Image (tube, rainbow, N blue to C red):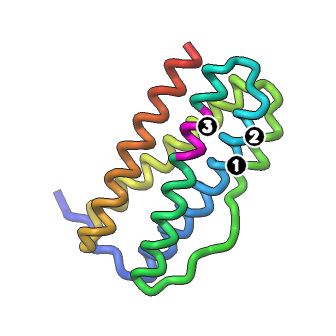
Amino acid sequence: MIAAPIAGQPEVIDFLNELLEAERAGARVALDTAWEAAEPAMAEIMQGIRRDEARWCAMLLRQIERIGGKPSPRTGPLHDEAMAIEDLRARVVFLNRGQGRVVRKLREMMPRLEDQALYADLAHMLSSHVANITIANSALG
């Protein structure tokens, strides 16, 4: 098996900014969905996801700046796409797919990182996303 090459600083910064934009979108979707949820349990789950997404946005901002990058000011397209889905359950499924893409991207990039502090933060982010996917799936039945 051939080891993946170590990611250089520009690639890492681009990757972190891509995650930052996705996390911003996810936080907004979760907040908007919590406000619209008729079921208190679903609203609570969405608020928890929103808090996590906001926490990861803050971590990504810190890490981008720490390694010498400039954080993107943009929000990813997931928000507009998700909010076009009127059925809240279908929107949560869509949000979970977005969370799953973040998990996949993290798993692909993490073995290519030399920065142990960044690796540790991204490992926490990965486990949080996996947990949130599981929680949302269980709420969906």
Which residue range is magenta in the image? 46-51
Q: Is residue 123 above or below residue 35?
A: below
Q: Residue at x 56, y 35 (%)?
A: 96
Under tag 3, what secondary structure? helix
Q: Which residue is mark 2?
A: 32
Mark 3 residue type: Gln
In the current view of this chain or complex, which residue is farthest to the bottom? Answer: 68
Under tag 2, what secondary structure? helix
- Measuring from the top left, give residue 37's x and y in whole percent: 74, 25
- Measuring from the top left, give residue 113's x and y in whole percent: 29, 69
Q: Which residue is mark 3?
A: 47
Label 1 packing within 10 angstroms: few (<14), some (14-19), many (20+): many
Q: Is residue 73 magenta?
A: no
Mark 2–mark 3 CB contact (< 8 Å) = no
Mark 2–mark 1 CB contact (< 8 Å) = yes
User: Could you say which is closer to the camera, residue 121 or residue 15?
Assistant: 121
Left/right of residue 97 with respect to residue 105 in the rendered view: right
- Measuring from the top left, give residue 1's x and y in whole percent: 16, 56
Return the disc, 2 or 3, that comes first in the chain's sequence. 2
Q: Which mark is residue 28?
A: 1
Q: Residue at x 36, y 61 (%)?
A: 109
Under tag 1, what secondary structure? helix
**Viewer-nearest of discs 3 and 1:** 3
Q: Main secondary structure of the magenta part?
A: helix
User: Could you say which is closer to the camera, residue 95 or residue 30?
Assistant: 30
**Total residue callouts:** 3
Quadrant location, the C terminus: top right
- Measuring from the top left, give residue 121's x and y in whole percent: 34, 60
